[in-house]
Amino acid sequence: MQFEDIPMGYQSPVTSSHSIFSPRDRFQYSRTDSRANLLNTPSTVWRSPRTPPPYSGVISSPRKWWHWRPTWFMYLSFLFGVACAIGHHVFYASLNGKPAVDQLAMLRYGTVISFAAKAGLVAAVVIAFKQRIWVTVRSKFLSLAVLDSLFAAAEDASALLNIEIYKQAKIAMLLAAFVWLTPILIILTSNTLTMELALSIENTTCSGIRTLNFTKDELEEWRNPTKSDNLYGLSMSIWNTTASDITSPDWFDYYTSPSNPLIRVATNAAFMGQAVSKSGINIDICSSGWNCTYTINFTAPAYKCSELASGVGSEVKTLENQKPPDGFSTKLLVPEGDYSYYAYASGGEYSTQQMKDTNPGGIPTMEPPFPEALGAFRTEPVIWIGYSVKTNPNEVAPLNRSMPGWSDAFIPKVIGCEHYETDYTVMFNLTSGQQVTKVTERKFQRRIIDTTWIQGTDANDGTNDNTTARPKSNYIYPRNVRQYRRVAAFHAIGSQLRGFLNGTMNSAQLNNPIGNTKADQTKLLNPRNDYFAFPTLADLVQELYEDMILSLFSNRQFLSVVWAAKSDVMSGTGAGDESTKYPCVRSRLENRYNYHSRDLWIVYSIAIFLAAAGVGSGTLAILENEGVLRSTRFSSIVAATRGPALEKLGWVGEDRGNLPRDIKNLKVGYGIVHRMSGLEVLQEDTQYPERRVWDGGDVHYGFGLEGDVQQRNEGS
């Protein structure tokens, strides 16, 4: 941007020399010589009263406010920088909390905006800096070395090493320091957008969720099995029949044993100590990369356990109407007895062989009519468990009863568990391919078979189980097909639990316990504590049974595994679709943008405040220059230094690339420059007797040595 070389529209008829001084400079200078014959013009000061030159100046009309003014660029640059800072905030705020997709691109965009903000603020301050330069050189004489550093301070870092410049041009150097420090703005603001691991949670639906519905076992006809995904549905039970002709009036099917798929699933659950899940269940239900939770409700069997005795010599209570087995008491358990674990879970068990005689084809040879109670479910075995816990489990117990402290080292306990039909509410949590289940609610509805087992009474019903139960009216008979099949399914599942619980653990010698039970393969007995049962055995028995039931989901061929959204449809092994979507909560850890708005605005606020102060300083400098925007372009420097005012200096030293040191230390200033010319001295000018006029008759403004230049002394 060029200087206003010929202010206010006036032009000298003698020369066309340019001036760097503003109209006010010239006007003020003309006022200092009150005895001179001055024209009423701010352009030229005439010293000779003899031949005042004529002027033919043309006064231009003042520009309207909407016309472009060079000074506006400083303010527009500042406003552009502020707008970019606001845009930076808006951009980062729009990304905050969203998944960090294309992170590199977003950071680059933010850096570009930050750079634009920095460029706008720096451009405004650079303009202000240049104005302060001219205010300084108009009011102070500075050495050439200081002038070199001052004019180069905003673009040459080595110029900042001149200590004297900080003493002579404090404000200008503060503005230059701002220019050099603003790259920090880009670094600090770019770091306000980070990527952090965050838990993304969404309430949605999942299409692969299943539940249990044992009605499917009630309705299944094993002679014509249900197929899904070209695979046969699996029952919980294996069946036998009284005749090959299903039209015979004496025909009916009756329960034989648990099915092999059920045995396999229950065994896996017992050994693993948790519910078994299907491989890849996370992807099937939650989709790839997601975890999910969901809650289902279903009706299934459960064992309800209660504590019946605790302590040496305590009497075992009855369980509902069930009396404990004969001879079952705490006397069997240490410290009085030899057992740390004693379980009786087969009283009243269903016989696997209802008819003794069969032909080679496996068909019963007993002639009809068949006994009324053939295949009937009379009772569900009650689980009776006696176990001992150590009084001080963290201390070493006596190894046998011959050692001191044996009688006080153990507490015998007895629990009893009955089989109930139960309403479950279960929460499934599928995380990182692992399934965690939690029964959040368990409502016991009714006993599977509401009878009481009568010990010591023989049954004459044609079966070999010799089980007697009352009342007989509550027996479940095979001809009551749906109820019978449902009870058969529950009985088959319960038999798997009872098979693991039954038996004993002889701990007469703690260092050599002898097990006669599968319970030591489950989570019920603690191998770190000499295979003593955990104190919370009653809860653990219920949990173990629930693990077996929930493990049914690992084999989707089971008839009773159905869609949670369509509980009347067997799910099979296939994936779900829109019709099987069921509420779930999906979650995953993902990189999300985290915008630190406070940090960004701290940085921008400081930068904007300093830039605003710089713009204010530049505004004052422009006002001191009567609204003229000055620059440091080549043409402007040439206009300020032309003429012979500095020619008397020896500019060339031994090293032609650098000024001699004595030249660098000379004081130079900017103002009205005078030259000794041979013309007379204006005797009437007593204020500036050293002043001489130029040959052309006009006053010249430029750089000159101290004593050759008249300045305005208004500070820096």
Image (cartoon, rainbow, N blue to C red):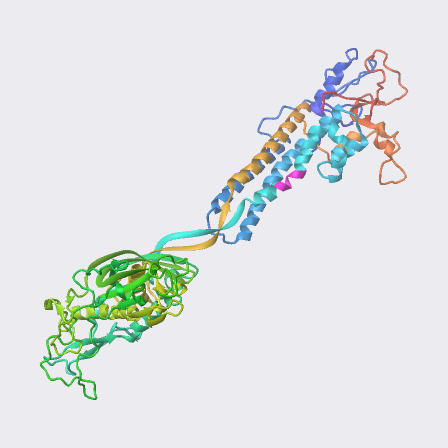
Q: x, y (%) of residue 168?
A: 75, 27
The vertical placement of 113 against 368, above or below, is: above
The vertical placement of 378 against 397, above or below, is: below
Magenta highlight: main SS? helix
Q: Quadrant of the C terminus?
A: top right
* Left or right, 44 with reference to 281: right
Would residue 303 be seen by someone viewing this image from the given angle? no
Magenta-colored stretch includes residue 674 = no
* Quarter location, residue 686: top right
Query: What residue span does the magenta drawing correspond to?
Result: 180-184
* Left or right, 579 with reference to 246: right
Q: x, y (%) of residue 639?
A: 77, 31
Q: x, y (%) of residue 688?
A: 82, 16
Q: Quadrant of the N terminus?
A: top right
Choose between 273 and 72: the one closer to the eye: 273
Q: x, y (%) of residue 32?
A: 76, 14
Choose between 488 and 413: the one closer to the eye: 413
* Quarter location, residue 71: top right
